[in-house]
Image (cartoon, rainbow, N blue to C red):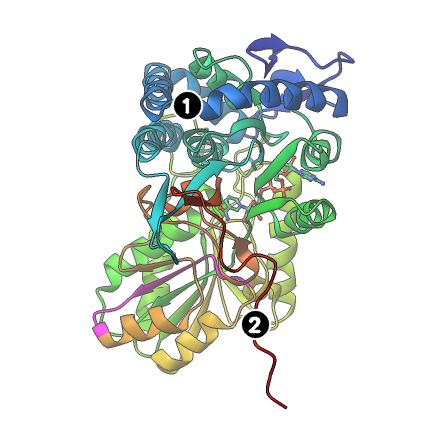
């Protein structure tokens, strides 16, 4: 059985309980992990709280060395981590190797960002004053993450939180706790209690972490439904809450673009990790004359994708994470078809797999705005494709959403690109370049897709609070103190 990492010790749950982690491609047991309860969360928070006074005062250079060291250890264990990620999460091995490198690069980036300025000097309002702002860590940060990119999404928080001087208690998803526990080997050189991991279920381990009085800040990535519960619990205690939630990202294809490139980009943006990416392209709006050829090319290219064991070579798509997620997707496709949409590729479980949560990459036409595929997050390999009259209609439909995580456009027209960029609410906007990441820029959601930003300088600022310091270097009584002297108004 894997063990949790609390106060730099490997440990079981206090009551000895554990849960199973199964491989979504084979349904076989990968390992078991401790099923933490509030008592284990309290132990981890106490360790993080005890470590905070020393960690917050650790010089930037020393913190940077530790973060770089963790990044080096990750690169040394890249294959072991990637294989475990594949076995518990189902993404193709190649994508998981990339995930390890991205996390290591993120740790390296924040190691250096953490050494930069931690405040600013302000022009005073009177002589002999010196005014400055210092940026301070909050204290213990509770980090809760989902299963689709278990290490990347944790890494984005962990790197910023630690570089800012916070100590952390992380809770990975119950579907993918094992790679996070293995990741902790890379943090063994950190001082005792700076980084802690508890594993278990949301209500049993996640909520006690959110509600713990000594947790000063909660950073969460996951579904809107859970995000709302966490926001409410944080509001109860007036606690800072950072939310990275779901999306229903639009993808516009304009007339005149190279449709071979645009359709391949669209297929990748839609089906990467079986559509289980928060910024998966989930709604396709194709303008006028581009429509028929785009659909044909999208369907033809989708048919070439290879589904199989994600550990095997030459596999483009693995399984979905679990039976429940697959059933959700199947229900949405069924609902669209019963409302008049037509499946043009996929739409069923592939043949030849007696085990595993596989589903064919799917595209539909004839979808209408009322269908849930165009209104709610699908989080699966489904592309509803909509024909639009012109670019203005495409932009209006793309923006007609309560979400605002990401948005894409393929166009040759600078005017159309700029119009779409200005009018569509999205924390990330991709022009002819779907789904790329860059640690140095902010990531997060507008509208109901989240609160706050990760990555970039914004991603460390969200883990720091501001303290404005007023200093008078010539001690003296002020003219505006008591007793007040003022002239009576003339009658
Ligand atoms: P989820 O909300 O079910 O779970 C996320 C995490 O929250 C897990 O660790 C879970 O155990 C925990 N949790 C569940 N209930 C809880 C509770 N009551 N209190 C505290 N913690 C609780 O999400 P998921 O199914 O694991 O992940 C998929 C979702 O994540 C999708 O909606 C996707 O869009 C979103 N996501 C967002 C981003 C982003 O950066 N915006 C990135 C990836 C995924």
Q: Quadrant of residue 138?
A: top right
Residue 29 visible in this rendered orientation of the protein: no
| Res 82 label | 1
Q: Which residues are magenta?
A: 403-414
Secondary structure type for disc 1: helix
Q: Measuring from the top left, give residue 147's x and y in whole percent.
A: 55, 35
Residue 58 image position (x, y, % from top left): 41, 21
Determine which residue is flagged by label 2: 486
**Of helix, strand and loop, which one carries label 2?**
loop
What residue is drawn where x is 38% and y is 56%?
A: 126
Q: Image quadrant of residue 475? A: top left
Q: Residue at x 31, y 28 (%)?
A: 108
Tell me the quadrant of ligand 1: top right
In screen coordinates, is 4 left or right of 284?
Answer: right
Q: Is residue 241 left or right of residue 416?
A: right
Q: What residue lies at 60% left-to-right and 18% top-to-bottom?
A: 50
Q: Quadrant of residue 96?
A: top left
């Amino acid at each position: 059985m894997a063990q949790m990492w609390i106060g730099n010790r490997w440990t079981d749950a206090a009551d000895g309980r554990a849960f199973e982690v199964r491989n979504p491609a084979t349904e076989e047991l990968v390992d078991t992990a401790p099923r933490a309860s509030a008592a284990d969360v309290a132990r981890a928070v106490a360790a993080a709280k005890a470590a905070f006074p020393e960690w917050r005062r650790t010089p930037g250079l020393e913190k940077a060395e530790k973060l770089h060291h963790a990044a080096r250890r990750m690169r040394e264990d890249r294959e072991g981590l990637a294989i475990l990620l594949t076995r518990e999460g189902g993404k193709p091995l190649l994508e998981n190797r990339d995930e390890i490198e991205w996390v290591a690069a993120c740790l390296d980036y924040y190691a250096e960002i953490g050494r930069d300025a931690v405040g600013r000097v302000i022009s005073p309002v009177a002589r002999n004053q010196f005014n400055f702002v210092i940026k301070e860590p909050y204290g213990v940060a509770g980090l809760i993450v989902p299963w689709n990119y278990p290490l990347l999404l944790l890494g984005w928080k962990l790197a910023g939180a630690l570089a800012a001087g916070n100590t952390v208690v992380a809770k990975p998803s119950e579907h993918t706790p094992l790679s996070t526990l293995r990741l902790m080997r890379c943090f063994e050189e950190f001082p005792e209690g700076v980084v802690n991991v508890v594993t278990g279920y949301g209500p049993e381990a996640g909520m006690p972490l959110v509600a713990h009085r000594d947790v000063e800040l909660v950073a969460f990535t996951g579904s809107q439904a859970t995000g709302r519960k966490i926001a409410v619990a944080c509001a109860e205690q007036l606690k800072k809450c950072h939310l990275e939630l779901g999306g229903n990202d639009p993808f516009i294809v304009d007339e005149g673009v190279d449709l071979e490139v645009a359709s391949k980009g669209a297929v990748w943006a839609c089906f990467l990790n079986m559509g289980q990416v928060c910024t998966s392209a989930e709604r396709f709006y194709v303008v006028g004359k581009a429509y028929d050829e785009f659909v044909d090319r999208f369907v033809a290219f989708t048919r070439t994708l290879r589904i199989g064991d994600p550990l095997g070579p030459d596999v483009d798509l693995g399984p979905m994470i679990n039976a429940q997620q697959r059933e959700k997707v199947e229900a949405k496709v069924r609902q669209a078809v019963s409302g008049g949409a037509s499946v043009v590729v996929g739409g069923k479980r592939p043949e030849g797999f007696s085990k595993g949560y596989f589903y064919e990459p799917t595209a539909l036409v004839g979808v209408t705005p009322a269908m849930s595929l165009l209104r709610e997050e699908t989080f699966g390999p489904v592309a509803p494709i909509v024909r639009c009259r012109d670019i203005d209609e495409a932009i209006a439909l793309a923006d007609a959403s309560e979400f605002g995580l990401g948005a894409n456009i393929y166009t040759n027209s600078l005017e159309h690109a700029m119009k779409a960029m200005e009018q569509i609410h999205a924390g990330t906007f991709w022009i002819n370049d779907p789904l790329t990441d860059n640690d140095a820029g902010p990531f997060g959601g507008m509208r109901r897709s989240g609160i706050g930003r990760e990555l970039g300088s914004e991603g460390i600022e969200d883990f720091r609070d501001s303290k404005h310091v007023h200093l008078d270097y010539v001690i003296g009584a002020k003219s505006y103190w008591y007793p007040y002297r003022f002239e009576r108004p003339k009658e």
